[in-house]
Image (spheres, rainbow, N blue to C red):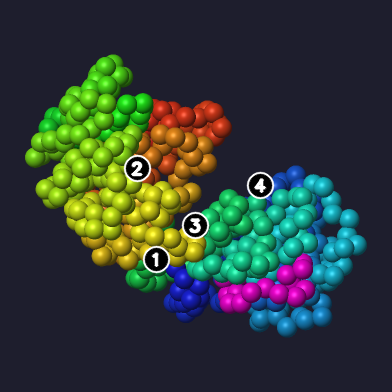
Amino acid sequence: MKIFSAAQIRKCDAFTIESEPVSSLSLMERAALSCADWLSTHYAETEYFYIFCGNGNNGGDGLAIARLLYQKGFNVDVFVDKKNENFTTDARANFVAMQGISGIDIFDFAELERINIAVESVVIDALFGTGLNRKVEGKSADLILRLNKICIPKISIDIPSGLFADRLHEPDSAVFLADHTLSLQFWKKSFLHPETGFFCGKIHVRDIGLSAEFISTELSDEFVIDLSLITAIYRPRNEFSHKGNYGKTMLITGSFGKMGAAVLATHAALKAGSGITYTLAPKCGYEILQTTCPEAMYRYGGEDFINKIEVDEESVVGMGPGLGQDPETAEALLIFLLDYKKPLVLDADALNIISKSPAHLKFIPENSVITPHPREFERLFGTSENSFGRLELAKQKARDLGIFIVLKDHHTQIITPTQKVYYNVTGNSGMAKGGSGDILLGIITALLAQGYSSEQAAIFGVWLHGSAGDRAAEKHSREAMVASDLVMELGNVFSSLAKRV
């Protein structure tokens, strides 16, 4: 799914109105119907909906939702700024229509203090939409801060008020803190970064029938990874195939006391479909690997740490988990990278060794995939003020080095050398545990070995990793799940995906 800027979303609305054709008021009604259906389904037993409406089209959505919820049999109270009823044309039409309903009480924002909020009720934020272009101040800011203190479910229509669609708000801004956001048609960039996504709660994208023609032809370099993209990438296995058709994966991992990382990466590569899998590791991990990963073959790389790296020409290499940073390991890794020209996958200590000198970055072969978490990224490329700035720096470095950067975060971003950005929306906080990154390294390397391009392997690998994590969390809970639970769910993810193609 493409991510559009606020300006592009307005263009899409206008194009839909002109080309369908449909009136802007009817389009607002379409959006309100979609949201009202969701609200009535998810809060069927609620006692009251308290809907806070601004003067713009977001407020118009809220006013239409109020009318529709009342017609569905709910109690609805609406709050507006009675001292400033300078509504947009469509918002005014919905305000007038709602005024004709005697069962809906209309209050001024200032009257909130004297209202006895029902316990079984819901607050709906329709104050400001994606058209917001400045910091919320004054009475509106005070209202948002007051609403944030109310301990009942809070829902934002399209975007939490106070947020911008595609950039960071000021640090001291008042922003509505939603439990759920009903986003109209599109993901917004601000939903996907930690400083702004924090305010959005769970995202529900509501299809309101905006022009498919506009969406398909309008250009964007930013995307949310969805099932349509994944099914386009995924290659079901040919019945008339053998292990040689699915590549040789060579994982360079492990050191004394860190062989668990090697085991997790190896298991992940096997479960991700690698035809033939080798693990190059120190001798101290030989028995561990042969016992826990009998399907993989062992390659000697040293005694207690790796100081010797030799790989087959046809193998695809992934390296880093549990590697350690012994000087001999660092020397062996850098010598190997100087001679190796094929795309590979780098994580963890491989990246930490490279980060010791800016000159080492040029050792990374073009079209390779690196998978840093924010601290590793900082060691490699320097600090950024926030995640928006970090993304811009990653785009620059991916272009300059000709590599793919998998920037791990709550919504991991895959950045390509051509400046495209893919956000992943699978995964959960239960994956924030040791070993999760080792598994991702194994998955991406195995996909690359199977003939997926670097871009496809990164996108598909991150999605698989997050989807397996979601299944593991559902089965074991976010608190109790461990990294190996994620590996064991990869088969279920593949089975589900195979039924879709």
Please provide the residue range marked out in magenta: 129-143
Tell me the tag on residue 392.
1
Q: What is the quadrant of the N terminus in the image? A: bottom left
Foreground disc of the pair 3, 1: 1
Q: Residue tagged by mark 3? A: 192
Instruction: Measuring from the top left, give residue 15's x and y in whole percent.
Output: 45, 77
Instruction: Measuring from the top left, give residue 2's x and y in whole percent.
Output: 40, 62
Q: Is residue 449 visible?
A: no
Q: Secondary structure at mark 4?
A: helix
Q: CA distance from mark 1 to mark 2?
A: 22 Å
Residue 215 location, quadrant: bottom left
Tell me the tag on residue 42.
4
Question: Residue extending furthest left?
Answer: 313
Q: Residue tagged by mark 2? A: 348
User: What residue appears at the point 77 percent right and 81 percent down from the top-left corner?
Assistant: 84
Identify which amino acid the numbered label 1 is placed on.
Answer: Glu
Identify which amino acid the numbered label 4 is placed on.
Answer: His
Q: Is residue 56 left or right of residue 247?
A: right
Q: CA distance from mark 3 to mark 1?
A: 14 Å
Magenta-colored segment: predominant secondary structure: loop
Identify which amino acid the numbered label 2 is placed on.
Answer: Ala
Q: Name the one closer to the observer, 307 or 32.
A: 307
Q: Against 132, is 41 above or below? A: above
